[in-house]
Image (cartoon, rainbow, N blue to C red):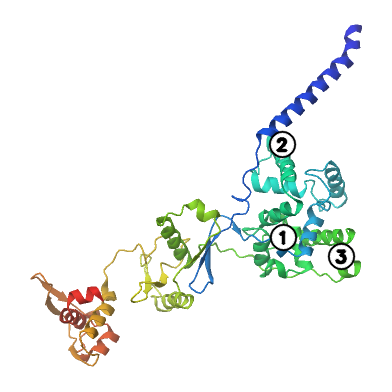
Amino acid sequence: MNNLRERLPRIAVLITGFGFVTGIFIFVFAYFTVSIPDPNAYVNSQSTIIQYADGSEIGRIGSENRTVVTLAQIPLTVRQAVMAAEDRNFYTNKAFSVTALAQAVIDNVISLGQGRGGSTITQQYAKTAFLTPERSIVRKVKELIIAIKLENRYSKDQIFENYLNTIYFGRGSYGVQTASQLYFGTTVDQLNVAQAAVLASILRSPGLYDPGFKAENLSRLENRFAYVIDGMVEEKWLTEEQASRVKFPLINPRVTSGALSGPKGYVISWVERELNRLGFTDEQLLIGGYIIKTTLVKEAQEAAVAAVNQEAPVRAPENLHIGLVSIKPGTGEILAMYGGKDYLKYQFNAATQGIASGGSSFKPFALIAALEAGIPLTSVWNGDSPKVYDDGIGRPYLVNNYGGKNYGDVSLLTATEQSINTIYVPLGIKAGVDKVVDA
């Protein structure tokens, strides 16, 4: 028994030593087996932007709403606000900091949870850009290893730039540029100190600090905002006088509509389908950052939507689906398209997927063929209803006007204005069916 007691300290030392050596071995093994994924693949991926012909934006294809900017485009005050909130010693510490972790614990106890986090910016970047959000020892080890490798491979400026373009700010925005636009309606280079401090405060946990998400978040955000401003003063990035002039800014209300909501969803999904047909994969469109300029004219598209809203039946049946396409003669360019009222509610595109009779849509082509054949708009035609014509293969073709209305003798101009069927059928026959097809 005495021998066992004498051996216990030695056994404890051996077990501790073995555990230490094993831990070192595992860490070294993991270091050489865990690789850094390509930071340009998903980290700096951007949504594919769909544009009108004039370059203005219609919408985006992409799971992450992100616009990448260089560090030089991000004001120093924005960078300092983020460091004040997340990692005040970023430019002097290593990949991870034991001291920072200890300080974070003390800081959060004193500030009742409003203090800084224990992870360095490099660790946060590693976690956000390359790893899943799961909480496990394996993921934490990978985070530390990737953080160390990032520090060895990239400069602090490169890491900080990628971090600011990667971190999630809530409201579907990834990166400081998109966050600036959603929260304040401006670009990052135009942010003032107060706005920068708000974004720096929110990025810690958008669900807890974005007042647009929950009204009770406002008080938490204001406390966090004060913490960031105080941190900037403490680090001498702001003077006491400058800080005293910083007031909590007005934040844009949260927009709840999705990227594909409303009529524009039909346009975006149609463009995406056409790009797929041209060989672009879904993954390329999600992360490629392409800019796709369409032939759609903004004013024409807005007019198309307005026309449907104004002219559609007020008490329309549920199965009524309205589609509209405006095509430029000669080139075939699509100038406007209306596929439905709300893509999120109904994904059937009435403009591209609807199968229905051409109806009066052939009349403009018949008119073009008639004018080219020398038939003037002043020519007189009989618009009574019904009438019977030859369908071209020897069978009778009964034609009625809408509502069975009789118009009598009218000019071709009036027939066009009133869309008279019993005039346009013989007009097409006289001009030549083949000419109507070619028009």
| Camera-side mark, 3 or 1 | 1
Amino acid found under the numbered disc labelled 1: Leu
Task: Give the residue drawn at x 39%, y 61%.
Answer: 348
Image location of residue 130, percent across then percent down: 64, 45
Task: Give the residue drawn at x 69%, y 36%.
Answer: 136
Dot 2 or dot 1: first in sequence order is 1
Q: Residues within 10 Å of mark 3 (few under 14, many from 20)?
A: some
Q: Which residue is mark 3?
A: 238
Numbered mark located on residue 59 in the image: none
Q: Label 2: state its secondary structure.
A: helix
- In space, the residues marked 2 and 3 are separated at their CA atoms by 36 Å
Q: Which residue is mark 1?
A: 71
Give the quadrant of residue 153. Answer: top right
Where is 118 relative to 344, above or below?
above
Q: Residues within 10 Å of mark 2 (few under 14, many from 20)?
A: some
- In space, the residues marked 3 and 1 are separated at their CA atoms by 20 Å
Q: Which residue is mark 2?
A: 141
Q: Is residue 204 visible?
A: no
Image location of residue 273, percent across then percent down: 42, 58
312 vs 143, left or right, is left
Amino acid found under the numbered disc labelled 3: Leu
Q: Label 1: state its secondary structure.
A: helix
Q: Is residue 272 visible?
A: yes
Count the marks.
3
Residue extending furthest bottom? 378
Dot 3 or dot 1: first in sequence order is 1
